[in-house]
Amino acid sequence: MIFNLFDRAILQKDFPEAGLKRGDVGIVVEHIIRDRDEDGYILEFFDAQGNTVDVFPVLESALEQPRPNTILTYREMSPGGIGPAHAAALSS
């Protein structure tokens, strides 16, 4: 396991279905152990005010740990914020 619970993890690719982009930072909230395939993580993503915008599963190979000498950026979310498939799940 590369990440521990509540670690920051950085996306290494875009996930347009969720409105997430490479470089977005999420918090690990679950580790998914798979016997035969690559492990995954469930990440929680927040807006600049600390509100949850998505909870999204990601394979370990699509994540990176924060490195020294890097800086977080500030970007607007796409219209509608998160992907529609995830919005319904979060509202229930």
Image: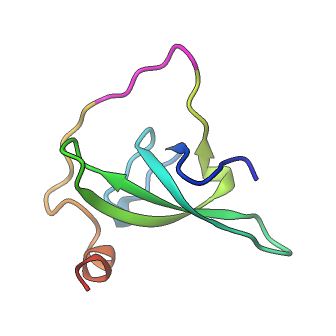
**Which residue sits at x=74%, y=70%?**
33
How many tags in the picture? 0
Residue 24, located in which quarter of the rendered image? top left
* Residue at the extreme top of the image, as rendered: 69
At x 29%, y 76%, the residue is 90
70 drawn magenta: yes
Residue 22, magenta (yes or no): no
- Using the rendered image of the protein, determine whether residue 11 is visible from the camera's viewpoint: no
Q: Residue furthest right?
A: 36
Q: Is residue 4 left or right of residue 37?
A: left
Query: Horizontally, is 77 left or right of 1 in the view?
Result: left
Q: Position of residue 25 (x, y in %)?
A: 43, 43
Examine the rendered structure and indicate whether residue 34 appears above or below residue 26: below
- Quadrant for residue 53, please give it: bottom left
Residue at position x 77%, y 73% from top? 34
Name the residue at 41% across, 21% down: 71
In the image, residue 40 above or below residue 91: above
Residue 70, horizontal then vertical, whole percent: 48, 19
Dividing the picture into quarters, in which one does residue 67 lie?
top right
For the C terminus, the quadrant is bottom left
Residue in front for this viewpoint, 61 or 25: 25
The answer to whether residue 58 is visible is yes
Give the magenta-colored segment's residue range. Answer: 68-73
Residue 2, placed above or below residue 17:
above
Please identify the residue farthest to the bottom as the structure is shown.
92
Vertical placement of residue 33 versus 2, above or below: below
